[in-house]
Amino acid sequence: MKHLLSIDDLSTDEIHALFATAADMHDVQGREVKKLPALRGRTVVNMFFEDSTRTRSSFEIAGKWLSADVINVSAKGSSTSKGESLRDTVLTVCAMGVDGLVIRHPASGAALQVSEWVDAAVINAGDGMHEHPTQALLDAYTLQRRLGSLEGRHVAIIGDLTHSRVFRSNIQCLTRLGARVTVVAPPTLMPSGITTWSAAAGFETSYDLDDVLRGDGVHGEPDAVMMLRVQRERMSGAFFPSAREYTVGYGLTRNRLALLRPDVPICHPGPMNRGLEIAADAADAAQSAVLEQVSSGLAIRMAVLYHLLAGETDGGMA
Amino acid sequence: MPAPDDTTPGPVSDRADHTVLDARDISRALTRISHELLERNKGAHDLVLLGLHTRGVPLARRIAEKIAAVEGAPVAVGELDVTLYRDDLRSQPTRRSHKTVLPPGGIDRKVVVLVDDVLFSGRTIRAALDALADLGRPSAVRLAVLVDRGHRELPIRADHVGKNLPSALAERVSVRLVEVDGTDEVSIS
């Protein structure tokens, strides 16, 4: 593994190896000296061409705790706003001797494209509506910590599937780890061609959230619920009549929360639209895993940086 | 997938393995180390045994059992992984890390005894000392090893040695323990 562009780049063994490393890294968060020397002398650049709080700061802290030098470049305030092309920006930064490049870009496939231009290890931190592999890894890692194992467990993914790279990475990661997945969305936010896709990848689809939460769907009661953000910034048309109508049909409201067993973790990749896809009662419930996802995210990103950058640069992951 | 530990037995060479210590020798050596530790520390108070992954961990547990049998009280044991502190990380494929587990009392103001199977270049111990510095401040750090085979590359020595085993650089010293390998044996080939 030289780059991490898609969950597809990882073998199932590699996913488990990353989780094992993440578990070791997790302990560092509780230490007084939160620093490991493993990436001393390595340089990591965070290139974010899209807004981000948690992913960028999480990669930044992960790199720093591993003693790498981390630099942030964002589209605003960089030469990109003067009209420099992505290729020129990337090559310029890499000419400074960068070992790892964490990239987020609104165009699907941007990370793959960049990986063909540079020698540095490229980590996809979200490319358009394509993939967000570290998010899927941290989600699965969080659920595995809560549930013990994902094998045979039923995970319901709910919300704006069409625009969600988190969903596209998660469906691969979860099914690979043996979870049974049901995806729920209004017809307008269900990706086109989902029936062929779900048949090939082996997951279920539903338009009725209450059915799925009650356990009336094919897979029965969910063991975990994953809410997705309604991505208004990617919506060019009207996908639902009003926010209220979305909440009534597909929001995790107080009434729907009551349908879930109290041990069912509730995940949300953030940032949350409170009151739209998730009610405050659900977001702040004891069973909510939202903040756990953030600390898991740090551990997972430390593990990814370690596996990509610590060893011989051409050696790949052992 | 994980890179082999430096103690993993390599492919069988054409020369037959020569057993240096059998199970009873290992047990006797650990008993002696346990008594030396107690004598030096004047008892088991404030003693923390930290086993280095992989085979130092079961050795630390065995020493702890022996000390507990003599003193009649349990002694703190932990595990220390130094993978992320190694100086050869970037010259080989990424190594798998292991868990570091400190006893509940921590290591601050304790006498920490690092326990490992083979003392060779001294680089693992150098890494362990760095790791310890990030985890706390022991009042003293000692080193106990089952085998000292020489060829130090750093100014490091062991306080307690089970067996001094002069060896040629090309020779391979293998420690096998029941907990990891299913048998107790130290051999050289």
Image (cartoon, rainbow, N blue to C red):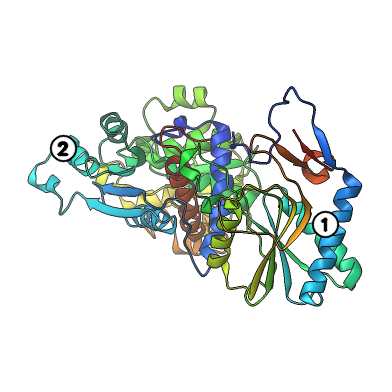
Residue A5 horizontal/vertical position (percent): 38, 35
Q: Which mark is residue B62?
A: 1
Callout 2 and callout 1 share a chain: no
Image quadrant assignment for residue B183: top right
Q: Nearer the viewer, residue A136 or A230?
A: A136
Which quadrant would the C terminus of chain A be assigned to in this image?
Answer: top right
**Residue depicted at x 12% and y 47%:** A79
**Residue depicted at x 50% and y 35%:** A317
Q: Nearer the viewer, residue A167 or B147?
A: B147
Count residues near mark 2 (Cα–Cα under 10 Å), then give few for <14, some for 14-19, many for 20+: few
Chain identity of mark 1: B
Q: Secondary structure at mark 2?
A: helix
**Residue depicted at x 27% and y 30%:** A113
Cα distance between the residues tagged 2 and 1: 60 Å
Amino acid on which the number 1 mark rests in the picture: Arg
| Outermost residue, left side | A82
Image quadrant assignment for residue A159: top left
Chain identity of mark 2: A
Q: Nearer the viewer, residue B144 or A108?
A: B144
Residue B14 horizontal/vertical position (percent): 74, 22
Count of residue discs: 2
Which quadrant would the N terminus of chain A be assigned to in this image?
Answer: top left
| Residue A118 appearing in the image | yes
Count residues near mark 1 (Cα–Cα under 10 Å), then give few for <14, some for 14-19, many for 20+: some
Amino acid on which the number 2 mark rests in the picture: Asp
Q: Are marks 2 and 1 in contact (CB under 8 Å)?
A: no
Closer to the observer: label 2 or label 1? Answer: 1
Look at the picture and state if B3 lies above or below A249: above
Residue B93 horizontal/vertical position (percent): 50, 36
| Residue A211 appearing in the image | no
Dot 2 corresponds to which residue? A88
Q: Secondary structure at mark 1?
A: helix
